[in-house]
Image: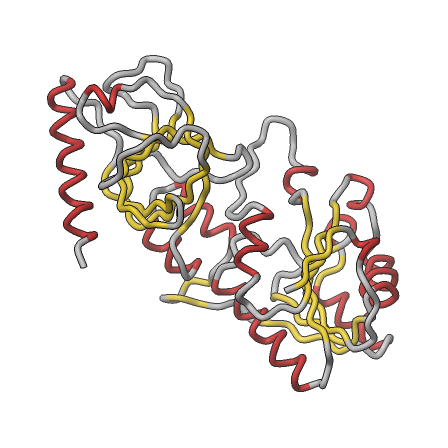
């Protein structure tokens, strides 16, 4: 897959099929759109499939003051996931407040048609673009045929009667519902964290942990303890991941993310680790003593070790 940074660097090809959107999470619904994009490319004998996406995410630019950005995938994660999904080219458009004022008609004519050479589009059922998201699928269906461009709208993907969307996955993660979040994503929820210095309490208890600093725009799941798999230098290690305020030992209420990595010895400070969240184990607890905390950690380790056995 070719990655083009900046619309000004995109090339024109009169046999292009295009899709457009943030594609945050690249969940099962998104993947259905991309599968159909690949099929339509063949059916229409076109030569290039293009996904237009944005960086920074529009939420980062247009959010109200004080509201958090909660991305399922950073741009790096999105591009990495797209590598295996059969797209010929991803064009990353720089999103600014000025760009957000572009009308959907101007964007369609100047970008999709004139700059890229789009002859067909595949979009999701709730697709919208342009200033104030005025360019929804109904407007697109009227505008595109006038320029000889075919439009196909993909219906939502359902699982157990629930339509899959990025917003529902965010809500599931914030509720600790890792089972549904992972099912709708079609893979374990992932994030990366840089190992930073902590309070070294885990080492004192016999269970040294890696404190992780997460990209502030990335959604961190609900407080609790999770069974995870952590990639260190190309190798997967089972781990217990604790997210929360450490109520037994801290009074400041600061939220921290720390991983107890099984079967690993060595220094990790400054390294970036990939965390795959597999299962929610239990909520955060306030233990009566450090001894009880130690026993609680031991129980978590036993559960994760048993589940990790082949």
Q: Quadrant of residue 128?
A: bottom right
Residue at 13% over, 37% down: 299
Q: Quadrant of residue 274?
A: top left
Residue at 45% over, 43% down: 191
Q: Please, is residue 112 above or below residue 262 in the view?
A: below
Colour treatment of the image: secondary structure
Q: Nearer the viewer, residue 105 or 94?
A: 94
Q: Nearer the viewer, residue 203 or 225?
A: 203
Residue 288's spot in the image, x, y percent?
Answer: 14, 18
Q: Residue furthest top?
A: 251
Residue 63's spot in the image, x, y percent?
Answer: 65, 36
Q: Quadrant of the N terminus?
A: bottom right
Residue at 55% over, 33% down: 68
Residue 48's spot in the image, x, y percent?
Answer: 72, 74
Question: Left or right: 144 with respect to 198?
Answer: right
Residue at 52% over, 53% down: 25
Question: Left or right: 61 with respect to 248?
Answer: right
Question: Left or right: 18 with respect to 233?
Answer: right
Residue 147's spot in the image, x, y percent?
Answer: 86, 75
Q: Nearer the viewer, residue 21 or 138?
A: 21
Q: Residue furthest front?
A: 266
């Amino acid at each position: 897959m070719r990655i083009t940074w900046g619309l000004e660097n995109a090339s024109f090809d009169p046999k292009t099929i295009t899709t457009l959107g943030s594609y945050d999470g690249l969940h099962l619904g998104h993947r259905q759109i991309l599968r159909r994009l690949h099929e339509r490319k063949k059916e229409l004998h076109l030569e290039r499939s293009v996904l237009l996406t944005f960086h920074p995410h529009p939420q980062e630019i247009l959010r109200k003051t004080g509201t958090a950005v909660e991305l399922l995938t950073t741009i790096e994660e999105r591009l990495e996931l797209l590598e295996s999904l059969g797209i010929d080219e991803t064009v990353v458009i720089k999103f600014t407040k000025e760009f957000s004022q572009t009308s959907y008609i101007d964007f369609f004519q100047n970008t999709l048609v004139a700059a890229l050479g789009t002859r067909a589009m595949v979009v999701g059922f709730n697709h919208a673009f342009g200033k104030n998201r005025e360019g929804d699928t109904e407007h697109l269906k009227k505008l595109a045929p006038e320029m000889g461009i075919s439009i196909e709208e993909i219906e939502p993907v359902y699982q157990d009667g629930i339509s899959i969307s990025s917003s529902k996955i965010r809500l599931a993660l914030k509720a600790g519902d890792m089972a549904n979040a992972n099912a709708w994503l079609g893979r374990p929820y992932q994030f990366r964290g840089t190992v930073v210095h902590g309070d070294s309490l885990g080492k004192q208890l016999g269970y040294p942990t890696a404190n992780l600093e997460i990209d502030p725009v990335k959604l961190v799941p609900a407080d609790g303890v999770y069974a995870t798999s952590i990639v260190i230098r190309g190798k997967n290690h089972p781990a217990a991941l604790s997210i929360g305020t450490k109520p037994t030992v801290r009074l400041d209420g600061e939220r921290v993310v720390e991983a107890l990595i099984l079967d690993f010895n060595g220094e990790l400070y400054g390294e970036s680790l990939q965390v795959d969240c597999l299962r929610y184990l239990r909520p955060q607890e306030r233990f009566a003593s450090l001894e009880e905390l130690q026993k609680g950690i031991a129980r978590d380790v036993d559960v994760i070790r048993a589940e990790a056995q082949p």
